[in-house]
Image (tube, helix red, strand yellow):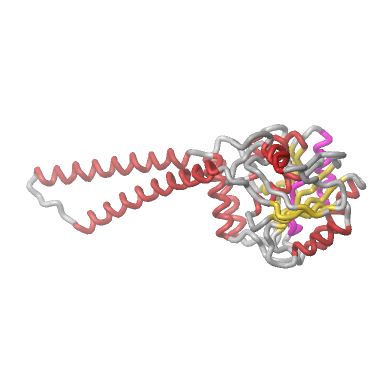
Amino acid sequence: MSMPLASHPSLRPIAARAAAPRVSVVVPCYNEEAVLAETHRRLRAACEAVCPGDFELVYVDDGSRDGSWPILSALADADPAVVAVALSRNFGHQLALSAGLSLARGERILMIDADLQDPPELLGAMMAKMDAGADVVYGQRSEREGETAFKTGSASAFYRLLNRLTDIEIPANVGDFRLVNRQVLDALLAMPEQHRFVRGLVAWLGFRQEALPYVRQARFAGETKYPLRKMLRLAADAITGFSVRPLRLSMLFALASFAVAMAIALYALATWLLGETVRGWASLTVVVALFAGIQLLCLGIMGEYLGRMFMELKRRPLFLLREVRSRGPGPQPAADADAAADAGTGGPAR
């Protein structure tokens, strides 16, 4: 089955949930043709070991430029457990993940990347923790194989900074690899932020969350899809999405600058009263440059928040689905445009 679909400002599911499977696995993919066959083999084996025949695998192609979509289409045509989703363009990892979550029908939902750094075989241990009462089971990396010291150190520093700035605790050394129940997912889908940091949103929701330590493995094949530029963008989304303390820090910078300026003014006045000429054009230049830099920093922080408010107020769809393929009872198209809008937003768009 192949169908065109479009998302809406809210992330409420647009999929009909008839005969919901016990587990849905959501896998965002971007240029992963080298690993998809092995990923599917291991994911399917892990699901069969836990809930035989009662699962679905939702692969989301985030505008890949390689042969990922033909592979996913072939998997969907051959395997009734597979739902292959193609976005209209590259929207980024977090929105691709959100697109898959909006279509997942399962009672429990596993989020995992396609690169096999997070072992699918941990699904059984996660299910056991959820059977014992957890609402969220997140994988916590005890070791990181195949990663540079810079990436490991910068990730550690980022989480320390993030937890100092935010009012909620976001576990360190944790990615999006986690199992959530339907109640948690429905709450997550009701949060329509444009700049999404999914692991932070799940932490904000609360509920009973438990860690599952594991060794993160090296990529099975291919290259990382998170270079430094994207890591910095994700860090900015995390900090500005969960804290206003940078704005308060800009006020402290401004107050500190004012105090230094007053001290310099008093010094200049005192030397004038004593009949001495204020010496040093170089020191004056340094002070002016310092104040200008602090002012620009404060303006940059405020501009970042204003820009994000501007993007949120547009209320554009978070993503657009170009095609969905499934042989099984996967997401069904709405009967008409009005029905699709109601299913997508839970009511009129705000």
Of the pair 3 and 149, the residue shown nearer to us: 3
Of the pair 149 and 207, the residue shown nearer to us: 207
Looking at the rendering, in which quadrant would you find the C terminus? top right
Question: What x and y, as percent, mark residue 35?
Answer: 77, 63
Where residue 70 sits, quadrant-wise, is bottom right
Q: Is residue 286 left or right of residue 226?
A: left
* Residue that extends furthest to the right in the rendered view of this protein: 52
Q: Is residue 126 left or right of residue 187?
A: right
Question: What x and y, as percent, mark residue 126?
Answer: 80, 43
Of the pair 322 and 148, the residue shown nearer to us: 322
Q: Is residue 207 left or right of residue 328?
A: left
Q: Is residue 222 left or right of residue 257?
A: right
Question: What x and y, as percent, mark residue 301?
Answer: 44, 46
Question: What x and y, as percent, mark residue 63?
Answer: 67, 60
For residue 232, above or below residue 19: below
Of the pair 63 and 40, the residue shown nearer to us: 63
User: From where the camera sits, is residue 202 visible?
Assistant: yes
- At 18% across and 56% down in the image, what residue appears? 280
Q: Across the whole image, how many numbered discs are drawn on residues?
A: 0
- At 65% across and 40% down in the image, what residue appears? 10
User: From where the camera sits, is residue 215 visible?
Assistant: no
**Is residue 258 within the magenta segment?**
no
Q: Which residues are magenta?
A: 107-132
For residue 223, above or below residue 161: below
- At 65% across and 38% down in the image, what residue appears? 203
